[in-house]
Image (cartoon, helix red, strand yellow):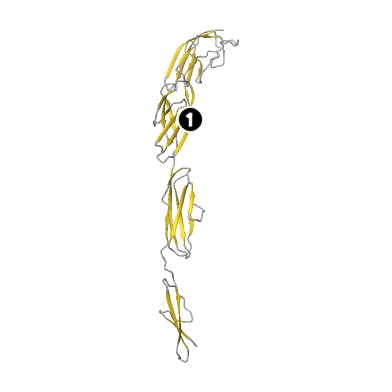
Amino acid sequence: PYQYTWGNGLGNGQSVVVSPFITQSYTVIVTDACNMTPASDTVTIKIPQYFPLQVLTSADPTICRGETAQLWAYATGGIGQHSYSWMNGTVSSDSLSVSPLQTTVYTVTVTDSCGMLITSSITVNVIYVVAGFSYEYQTNNLVSFNNESINGQNFSWDFGDSESSILENPEHTFTDTGVYIVTLTVINDLGCSSVIRSPVEVYPPYHLYVPNAFSPNGDGINDYFAPIAIGVVKTKMLIFDRWGGLLFFSDINNPVWNGIDVNNKLVQLGVYVYQLEYETPAKHKYSDIGTITLIR
């Protein structure tokens, strides 16, 4: 029988299993029962020099919401081919295009041919701008605008009447009545922008016109007591008889009274007391009390 003796302290046996970390040679000596000159042989297992696997990635980018960021990774060291796998993405390559709506962390894992792996991450910072504003009437045509935008540093107002402003909270006097489309454009230091448009109604100065008589007889002429208020947004009208009893009430704009009381009965010929209350867009309140003659 043959006897096998391995160097390197591997013991005896026809075969042995080794796991070298560096290039190393192994010698086996074989003898037989006759104790003749032994035979030997050497095998060398070559282990290439292993440089640690490393990965470089692009810097953390900052983008505006809706823009695209290009991410990349570059692996060095290791052995053989490098493979890339991105979390939060499905692309298995060394680069990835992303358009997140909010700040997101993307992780890339690099693996070499020996199964060694390394992980790195890139944070895509998303900056968003949201334009918004409210407004208040100072008078019927003087409006104060309140900027309510998020993450904006530069403001551009278009008041819809060929006038503009770059103030954050401007006031504007409209020279004519009507509805104007006011536009606010907001931009931050990175150039991210947002636009909002909103209609603003401009009212004429307050005026009140009250008739002194009406004849609700159904002839189509002067059938209603209908005061006309200009430049108001809220109205209240009350009608009383001579003893202070309430005959009519309305809080709709431009109210009219047809001579019928709260019990749905025709009131008689006579003089009645009216009370009118109005409020302008600037929350200025006006009231008027007088008499109206009903003619049958």
Which residue is at a point 48% across and 30% down the rendered structure image? 198
Q: Percent x, y for residue 34?
A: 47, 92
Badge 1 marks a residue whose secondary structure is strand
Q: In this picture, is 50 found above or below 239?
A: below
Q: Identify the residue at image location x=45%, y=38%.
A: 193
Where is residue 226? Give x, y as percent: 52, 14
Depicted 153 relative to depicted 274: above or below = below
Residue at the disc numbered 1: 198
Q: Quadrant of residue 289?
A: top left
Give the residue at x 47% y 14%: 208
The location of residue 80, given as percent across then percent down, is 47, 64
Compared to residue 79, the image places residue 138 above or below, namely above
Judged from this view, the residue extending furthest toward the bottom is 34
Q: Quadrant of residue 133?
A: top left
Q: Is residue 184 visible?
A: yes
Which sits in the foreground, 93 or 101? 93
**Res 87 visible:** no
Q: Please give the name of the residue rendered at 42% of the width and 19% of the height, measured from the top-left corner.
A: 285
Residue 64 in percent (x, y) is at 45, 42
Residue in front for this viewpoint, 277 or 152: 152
For label 1, count other residues whose C-alpha is less than 10 Å away and answer few (under 14), some (14-19) or many (20+).
Answer: some
